[in-house]
């Protein structure tokens, strides 16, 4: 053989792989354990996160302030609603207990 390969079955398997997958099938596969994250790649990702630009324009700040105000109002409303519900539940329990006590006294 020209390349020093004397195993015809290996050549047949290479030809079949080439026909099935294409030239990528014949590329050498890396052996062994995969490398851990490269320090260089970590540095690049850190720089990318630093490059995130925060919109501090007056218009954007105004929109955020408006949203914050709406959320504060909604939060106060829900807190008050919860307080009223708990108050009603306490009154109902009180009425229930007093009606049981009056029933027991009547017996």
Image (cartoon, helix red, strand yellow):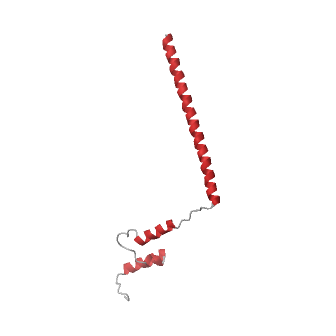
Residue 75 against residue 61 in the figure, above or below: above
Residue found 46% across the figure and 70% down from its top: 44
Residue 57 against residue 1 in the figure, above or below: above
Q: Position of residue 74 (x, y in %)?
A: 60, 43
Q: Position of residue 37 (x, y in %)?
A: 40, 68
Q: Position of residue 68 (x, y in %)?
A: 59, 50
Residue found 39% across the figure and 80% down from its top: 11
Q: Quadrant of residue 2?
A: bottom left
Residue found 48% across the figure and 69% down from its top: 47
Would residue 16 be seen by someone viewing this image from the given angle?
Answer: no
Would residue 27 be seen by someone viewing this image from the given angle?
Answer: yes
Q: Quadrant of residue 42?
A: bottom left
Residue situated furthest right in the rendering: 59
Q: Which one is in front, 30 or 14? A: 30
Residue 81 horizontal side relative to residue 12, left or right: right
Q: Position of residue 80 (x, y in %)?
A: 58, 37
Residue 75 horizontal side relative to residue 27, left or right: right
Residue situated furthest bottom in the rendering: 2
Q: Quadrant of the N terminus?
A: bottom left
Residue 8 horizontal side relative to residue 56, left or right: left
Q: Which one is in front, 2 or 59? A: 59
Residue situated furthest top in the rendering: 107
Q: How many marks?
A: 0
């Amino acid at each position: 053989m020209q390349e020093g390969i004397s195993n015809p079955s290996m050549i047949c398997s290479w030809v079949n792989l080439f026909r099935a997958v294409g030239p990528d099938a014949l590329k050498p596969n890396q052996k062994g354990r995969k490398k851990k994250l490269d320090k260089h790649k970590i540095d690049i990702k850190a720089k990318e996160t630093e490059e995130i630009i925060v919109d501090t324009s007056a218009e954007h700040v105004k929109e955020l302030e408006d949203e914050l105000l709406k959320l504060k109002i909604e939060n106060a409303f829900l807190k008050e609603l919860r307080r009223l519900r708990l108050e009603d539940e306490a009154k109902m329990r009180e009425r229930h207990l007093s009606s049981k006590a009056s029933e027991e006294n009547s017996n």
